Image (cartoon, coloured by chain):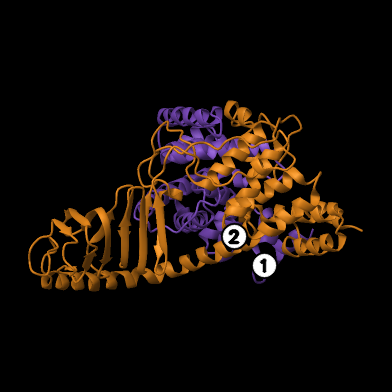
């Protein structure tokens, strides 16, 4: 339960916290107590770990000895892992699509190139085999279980191999990765979090980012009412830090992901007092994010917050469609909000059913009193 | 009254559920019972401090699944090393120290796994998602800016900022939790504040 100090100015909460952290920490605004289910689950794991610790000591001594002997024997029998050569014995440096036959490597992996394509080897040692696809299309059939990490660079995207067969096609402004077997990791600045896993049977096309807006159709421009509440333009994409590099001090680039851009635009609209525009952005977050994306749940909660009094049916609909995506810590409040929304919208039977569900899940919940109020006849 | 009767019962019959009795028993008594090998006292101690440890873990990690693992690691270590706690007044601070230490380890491991694309954990609990449902949109928007700033910070600065400004610990407590000097903590907070302020003052979307 978040404590509320009557003198505590919510709007100035952050300023207060930064000025007087011991008196008004931000934690007072947060609601992050664990549910009883979670508490119980965590204890079971802790208790189990504690009981197994004693037995583990004896087993670990025996295991360490056995593994050490195994490693020593394995190492003595293996040839040293150095350069990866072609099957014929030569070391590959440049591969082109001049011939129809694939290049077969000593570890059983194959690289097939289309006519006019070119692959150069950037790094080749016992730990990694890094190539760059300069142009065209290549199919890489990597033998799984090898000692090396395979990477195919393709300009503004790179593909890391996790034991697969995949095809990379590079054009002037796009890189397409199609996976036939296994999984690859594609890294590019324009991807959410800078990287995306692509599984067998799937393809991913990465476009090079340009200076134009990357989010599709602005529905506010089609508003038949033609009101002045036009959503402000979204921030332009910019180059930024890739997800796997060290964080840069002082960089304040805007978010790259389209969903993040919509959420940022909604935040900006709300700060300007433009609720209509904010709702438009939030509707698009709900429409464009996946069913389990927690941001979808957050957007639904904000829609409910903004429309609860004026359009409770809209609030109820938003919550109903996205409740499963709400982060676990807000699930209780979201369900309580649904009860309120349905009651305000006039659907008392639904409000009562939802209230019963709330009280079943959270018998001592912090919103129990509100829920009972909204569901009373 | 019911709780007192339950305490008396615990002394003579089988232990009862921890959440019914532990609020009545001081830390000192719990530690004494633990030292005597009372298994029930372990769960009682856990339930007394799990909310504190969970809240800290969740805010530091920003991910509920990793926070759960962190809580587990913390209590496994704490229950093993409890004999080291000499003063019962130091118990809470010591638990927080263990939590922060374990969080550092997890963050290093997480960073390495993410670089290799092997981490499946999602950051599903940034501060903005933890805000109470009836908080104003302005507070929510401000916290999102804070989350973005915190994501840019190195681990030490991020942890120091959260412990100080979210959890409200004193500078000395933050230094103790992070196992470093007061001067180091002040330096980290200075840098972290500069980053947070930059994000708070910037417009959330740069209008093109």
| Element at label 2 | loop
Which chain's residue wears label 2? A
- Residue drawn at x 47%, y 41% is B151
Can you identify the residue that label 1 sits on? B16
Residues marked 1 and 2, same chain: no
Of residue A83 and residue B170, the one placed in the foreground of this image is: A83
B165 vs A149: above or below: above
Q: Which chain is orange in the picture?
A: A
Q: Name the subunit of mark 1.
A: B
Q: Is residue B202 above or below residue A239?
A: above
Q: Is residue B31 left or right of residue A306?
A: left
User: Residue A13: image x %, image y %?
Assistant: 65, 32
Judging depth in this view, the residue of A160 and A171 nearest the camera is A171
Residue B5 % position (x, y): 75, 63
Numbered label attached to residue A291: 2
Please, what secondary structure does the residue beneath circle 1 have?
Answer: loop
Residue A138 shows in this picture:
yes
Hue of chain B?
A: purple
Closer to the eye: label 1 or 2: 2
Mark 1 closeness class: few <14, some 14–19, many ≥20 residues within 10 Å: some
How crowded pointer 2 is (Cα within 10 Å; few <14, some 14-19, many 20+) is rated as: some
Residue B195 location (% of width, % of height): 47, 30
């Amino acid at each position: 339960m978040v404590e509320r100090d009557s003198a505590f100015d919510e709007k100035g909460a952050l300023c207060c916290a930064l000025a007087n952290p011991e008196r008004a920490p931000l934690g007072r605004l947060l609601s992050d107590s664990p549910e009883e289910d979670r508490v119980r689950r965590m204890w079971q794991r802790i208790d189990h770990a504690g009981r197994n610790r004693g037995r583990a000591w004896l087993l670990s001594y025996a295991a360490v000895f056995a593994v050490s002997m195994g490693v020593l024997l394995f190492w003595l029998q293996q040839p040293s892992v150095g350069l990866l050569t072609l099957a014929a014995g030569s070391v590959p440096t440049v591969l082109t699509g001049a011939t129809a036959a694939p290049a077969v490597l000593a570890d059983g992996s194959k690289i097939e190139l289309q006519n006019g394509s070119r692959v150069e080897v950037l790094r080749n040692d016992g730990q990694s085999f890094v190539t760059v696809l300069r142009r065209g299309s290549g199919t890489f059939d990597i033998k799984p279980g090898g000692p090396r990490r395979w990477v195919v660079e393709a300009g503004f995207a790179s593909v890391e191999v996790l034991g697969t067969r995949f095809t990379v096609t590079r054009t002037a402004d796009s890189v397409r990765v199609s996976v036939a077997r296994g999984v690859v990791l594609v890294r590019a600045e324009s991807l959410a979090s800078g990287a995306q896993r692509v599984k067998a049977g799937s393809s991913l096309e990465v476009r090079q980012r340009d200076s134009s807006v990357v989010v599709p159709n602005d529905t506010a421009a089609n508003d038949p009412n033609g009101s002045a509440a036009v959503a402000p333009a979204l921030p332009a994409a910019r180059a930024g830090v890739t997800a796997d590099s060290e964080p840069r001090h002082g960089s304040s680039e805007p978010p790259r992901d389209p969903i993040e851009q919509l959420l940022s635009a909604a935040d900006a609209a709300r700060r300007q007092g433009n609720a209509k525009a904010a709702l438009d952005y939030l509707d698009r977050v709900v429409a464009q994010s996946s069913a389990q994306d927690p941001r979808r749940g957050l957007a639904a909660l904000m829609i409910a917050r903004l429309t609860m009094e004026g359009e409770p049916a809209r609030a109820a609909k938003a919550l109903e469609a996205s409740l499963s995506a709400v982060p676990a810590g807000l699930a209780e409040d979201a369900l309580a909000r649904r009860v309120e929304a349905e009651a305000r919208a006039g659907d008392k039977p639904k409000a009562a059913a939802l209230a019963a569900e709330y009280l079943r899940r959270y018998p001592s919940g912090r919103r129990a009193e509100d829920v009972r109020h909204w569901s009373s006849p | 009254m019911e709780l007192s009767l339950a305490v008396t019962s615990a002394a003579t019959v089988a232990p009862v559920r921890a959440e019914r009795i532990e609020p009545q028993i001081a830390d000192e008594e719990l530690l004494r019972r633990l030292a005597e090998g009372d298994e029930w006292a372990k769960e009682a101690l856990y339930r007394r401090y799990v909310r504190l440890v969970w809240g800290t873990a969740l805010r530091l990690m920003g991910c509920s699944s990793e926070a759960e693992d962190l809580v587990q690691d913390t209590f496994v270590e704490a229950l093993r090393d409890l004999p080291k706690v000499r003063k019962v007044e130091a118990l809470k601070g010591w638990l927080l120290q263990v939590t922060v230490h374990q969080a550092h380890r997890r963050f290093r491991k997480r960073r390495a796994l993410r670089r290799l694309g092997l981490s499946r954990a999602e950051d599903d609990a940034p501060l903005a998602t933890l805000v109470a449902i009836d908080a104003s949109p302005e507070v929510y928007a401000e916290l999102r800016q804070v989350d973005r700033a915190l994501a840019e910070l190195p681990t030490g600065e991020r942890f120091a900022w959260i412990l100080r400004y979210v959890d409200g610990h004193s500078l000395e407590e933050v230094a103790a939790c992070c196992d470093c000097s007061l001067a180091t903590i002040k330096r980290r907070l200075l840098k972290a504040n500069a980053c947070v302020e930059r994000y708070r003052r910037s417009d959330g979307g740069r209008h093109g």
